[in-house]
Image: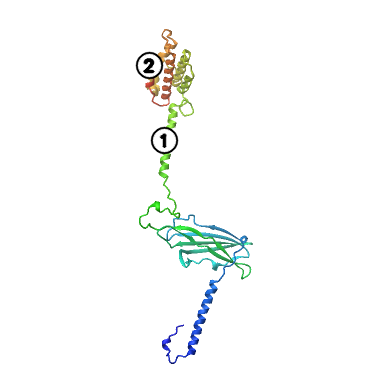
Amino acid sequence: MELNLTMIKTKRFSYKWLSIYSASLMAIILSLCSVSLAFANDEPSPEIPANKIKLFLTSPERDVGYTVGDILTRKIRLEVQKPYCLIPTTLPIAGYERRYKNQVTGIEVRKISHSEESNASSHTYTINIEYQVFTTGPTAKPVALPAEVIKFQGAKKDDIVQYTIPSFRFRVSPLAVFGAVKIEYDMSTFNPPLLLQTYPEKQKLVACLTTLALSLIGLLYILGSRAWMPLMGRPFANAARTLKKLKTNEDGVRQGISRIHQALNTTAKTSVFNDSTDLFCRENPKFKPLENELKRFFEMSHAVFFDTQHQSSNHEKNMLWLRTFCRQCRDCERGLIPNLKSTEALKK
């Protein structure tokens, strides 16, 4: 009510009317104060018994890295035993922005929806709340989705209880950095750790390990004498293993020459003699680099078995040459290039 005192002339203004207006104004002020005190002194409802309610809460997966405008969603599922039932008017209101100590928190309820399922003994309420961030700062700062207080009504009208959904604390980062920032002076506990990109290093590591594995396999293939890999159980590979076990004497040299003859015949699928080495090399081109060595082998074989007058007494040198020659033949049957320097050194 607006009172225009200028319309009342001073001479005609009476003390009676002034008392009436003063009393009415005082009554209005007292009524407003009583209402404010009533709201200020409104005590919260008692908590619902713990055995009457179950909470299943799904909060955002991360708690850092949010900026102004981001939306966070919480899914709340409450299983409440009867006779308690939800009071829908106590749910958060869309568009309501919470305050803390009369200051805007910067978190607003953007959207809310709820559904209800009932059975013989309980009610199940599913509440989806979307919050939007409207706060920022020069550095990362902590904020929180508020703790929501939801009330339930029991069997009686005045049997009102409440349940508090816990808050969710997270960090809001600025959209841009203000000024020059040195990372060593900005190691805030609210900043997420800096992660190194390990993908290029992983690629290099895999490439190095693959190269190492292939190198080891190739080395075993070249130097190995066992038959556990393809092309490693051929005749000359078996002969090389046999020659390693022979003694370095005349009998050992004879057995070694016989073993190499057997490997040659198995490879050629026919008997190989001194005058058929050219044919053997043409039919088995892998042995072409050893054409001269084959001729020397047949000369040694003829001297050991048939030329008794010119037999060499240096059995150790002969056995060493046979073993080297057999390894060269083994390399040829595996498709490798033999090392001829080893036998040339033994000729001297």
Q: Quarter of the image for the C terminus: give it.
A: top left
Task: Label 1: state its secondary structure.
Answer: helix
Q: Is residue 111 above or below residue 28?
A: above
Quarter of the view holding residue 280: top left
Decide which of 207, 285 is in the foreground and name it. 207
Q: Is 289 positioned to the left or the right of 63 in the image?
A: left
Q: Dot 2: few (<14), some (14–19), or many (≥20) neighbours within 10 Å? A: few
- Can I make out residue 116 in this image? yes
Secondary element at tag 2 = helix
Q: Which residue is mark 2?
A: 347
Instruction: Give the total of numbered labels.
Output: 2
Is residue 180 depicted above or below 248 in this figure? below
Please name whichever residue, 41 or 119, is drawn nearer the observer in this view of the structure.
41
Say which quarter of the image contains residue 106: bottom left
Question: Which numbered dot is residue 235?
Answer: none
Identify the residue under disc 1. Answer: 211
In the rendered structure, which amino acid carries the disc numbered 1? Thr
Q: Nearer the viewer, residue 337 or 111?
A: 111
Q: Position of residue 310 (x, y in %)?
A: 41, 9
Q: Position of residue 248 (x, y in %)?
A: 46, 15
Locate residue 330, reporting x and y percent.
Answer: 43, 23
The residue lying at 48 percent from left, 13 percent from top is: 251
What amino acid type should be assigned to the residue bearing mark 2?
Answer: Lys
Mark 1, Cα crowd under 10 Å, few <14 / some 14-19 / many 20+, is few
Vertical side of 228 occupied by 253: above or below:
above
Q: Measuring 47% from the left and 62% from the top, which residue is drawn there?
A: 131
**Furthest residue in direction top, as rendered:** 309
